[in-house]
Amino acid sequence: MRFKRTRLSLAIVCLITVCSFAKAQVVTIPVETIHNALVLQTDARKNLKMVYFGAKLSNAAEYAAIKKLYKPNDDSGILDDAYTPSGSANLAEPALTVTHADGNKSLDLLYVNHTITKADDNVSLLTITLKDPAYPFEVKLYYKTFYKEDVTEQWSVITNNEKGIVTLNKYASANLNFKKEGEGFWLKHYHGNWASEMKPEESKLTHGIKTIDSKLGTRANLYEPSTFMISMGKPATEDEGKVFLGSLEWSGNFRVDFEYDPADNLRLIAGINNAASEYRLKPGEEFTTPALVYTYSDHGRGDASRQLHRWARQYKIVDGNGSRLTLLNNWESTYFDFNEAKLAQLIKDTKKLGADMFLLDDGWFGNNHPRNGDNAGLGDWQENKLKLPNGISSLVKEAQANGVKFGIWIEPEMVNPASDLYKAHPDWVIKEANRPEKYFRNQLVLDLTNPKVQDFVFSVVDNLFTRNPDLAYIKWDCNAVIYNAHSQYLKKDQSHLYVDYVKGLYKVLDRVRARYPKVPLMLCSGGGGRVDYGALKYFTEYWPSDNTDPLERIFIQWEYSYFFPAIASSNHVTDWGKQPIKFRVDVAMMGKMGFDIVVGKLNDKDLGFCQQALKNYDALKDVIWHGDQYRLQNPWDNDAAALMYVNDSKSKAVVFNYLVNNRYGTGTKSPIRFKGLDPQKKYTVKEINLYPGSGSVLHDNQVYTGDFLMAVGINPEISSYHTSVVLQLDAVN
Ligand code: DGJ
């Protein structure tokens, strides 16, 4: 087996259904969550079809009647397969294309049986076995449902039972079919680049295939992430409409095809990008594809995103229901130019500010090739003796002496040609021996398909913790893409490189988590080049973008927030942008707050404001991290953006309002309606994060019912004089 997924450890295992291949009757398989259902059904030939997706029916027996209500959607009946094979009777865009051991390229997949296992009351796993009647070739489809969260993870496992090698030419994780709906389907997807992540575009899908993909290898989301949103029937709004949110749990090349088919249905095929990535399976080997995670709501994007957030906190990101550390980072205040004395001051500043931890960024390592710029040192993970003669351990102690924690930056997958590592192990580097080296940020990517490289990358982390057991945090960066994709280790299996790289990365991260299960890790990739749930399974938080201009961040954080929960969004206050410190802090507060400024340069008022804001954050972080998020007014269409968080018991909430348009006279002319409150409860509404010396524009401590706040709202009086306003709501008895 080349690529095996960790099996579910099932607390309760119950075999619900086992249908034998011999029986000819139609089999209907509903995949239900609390509100939704996806229904699969066999036809007379035992082809498995996806016949329904949408609101769950109250009588599950009626799912069986759905398919016959639709006229065949095409002459060939090929457009609604649950997992489309290629090269036989099915001519539609395939989920799976193979070359059999004998060179034959045809594939047919027929239903054999299915089982449902329950991990607990909330989590179930449906497994459906499909087999080719002509070849000993098997595919298992997996649908793991999170009932209360309305979330499904879907993937496939492909097994070669033939006598020779089978090549997988395309191997999708999931193939979904959505029946014709209203005016059609709208796809919202994202593009971007360094410092301009998550730029949305939404358009109506026209007939044919629209594909979003990445071929960058590492930093795969630099130009485009695999996260997307489909509105069905008409464009969904925050609170209305049918909407599907999806994201591939994979940190490498991906491909998602959206085919608006001739019958006006939508076919979705998502998985690893097969470009230059044919995968050979030896006899008896299986290949597990990464999961596509998705959720659906017929109450708009807000509801769908809250479902995904709940799932991510409960089941995916590390310590999703736990706590996080506020921090002071030195990247923007020192870049590579620091020494022990400077850092000792920054550690003191961390304490003075009131943050939990000091995070030492890039530049602390390399001796023969000191890391004094981005052109040397990557790979040589020894403290630079000139900058840090007493090593990291003395800094950890310094932090402890000052009552704060200490964290550190690494980029262990990378190497600069100017490094001892490169000279010692040229065979560990991904490059074409016969071509000139091509660098991205002056660096190359280490070959994580090679177990020795995996050991090395693991040792970078392990050595840091072994030598510094009190190290509290790691920021894991990844700044280069893969050029000249060639692995000396893979020899004749070069087309496995992109896949086995990610697999190697996950092996390392598995080892890190096995030994250090709790330690907070930040997922960074020169900004948001690797924000996906495949990686977030190992991390506590991600770095959305190097662009920390708060105005830009409002838009970037807004778009990420549809897919990833606030607790995972690292938002730092920096000197980017022209906005006052209050605005910068208020924007950082809508997620996991940190600072990357020169505290020593803050005037007394700015410092006092930041210190107070951290105290306010302390009192509200539980609501922001673990509460429900409601987007009230989007930054794209309004002068002011507003969003809020409400805790589970609806006793506490916080509302963030930001001016996003600087033209004359802009601001909030009318109240902004709140969401998610208890209409029966009464709430005090108080402005917090007031800049020293300035009063609130609101009448303090006014009490309103949740009903009033949701039907009428509050005008936060956003204007060029009050560019950001943070409101705290507390239920009164
Ligand atoms: C890119 C990251 O996004 C930055 O935050 C910083 O850590 C630099 N790398 C350091 O080289």
Image (cartoon, rainbow, N blue to C red):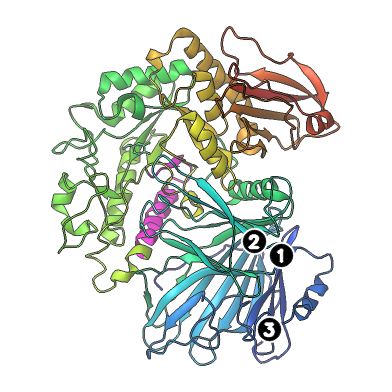
Task: Give x and y (percent) for residue 480.
Answer: 31, 49
Task: Give x and y (percent) for residue 336.
Answer: 26, 30
Q: Are marks 2 and 3 in contact (CB under 8 Å)?
A: no
| Image vertical order of residue 615 relative to residue 477, above or below | above
Task: Give x and y (percent) for residue 680.
Answer: 86, 32
Snapshot quadrant of residue 348: top left
Magenta region: 500-525
Q: Is residue 502 magenta?
A: yes
Q: Nearer the viewer, mark 2 or mark 3?
A: 2
Q: Is residue 274 left or right of residue 689?
A: left
- Pointer 3 residue: 19
The Cα atoms of the two marked residues, 2 and 3, are separated by 35 Å
Name the image quarter holding the N terminus: bottom left
Residue 185's tag is 2
Q: Disc 3 marks which amino acid?
A: Cys
- Sequence-earlier tag: 1 or 3: 3
Residue 181's tag is 1
Name the image quarter holding the C terminus: top right
Q: Disc 1 marks which amino acid?
A: Glu
Predominant secondary structure, magenta span: helix
- Which residue is at the far front? 664
- Sequence-earlier tag: 2 or 3: 3
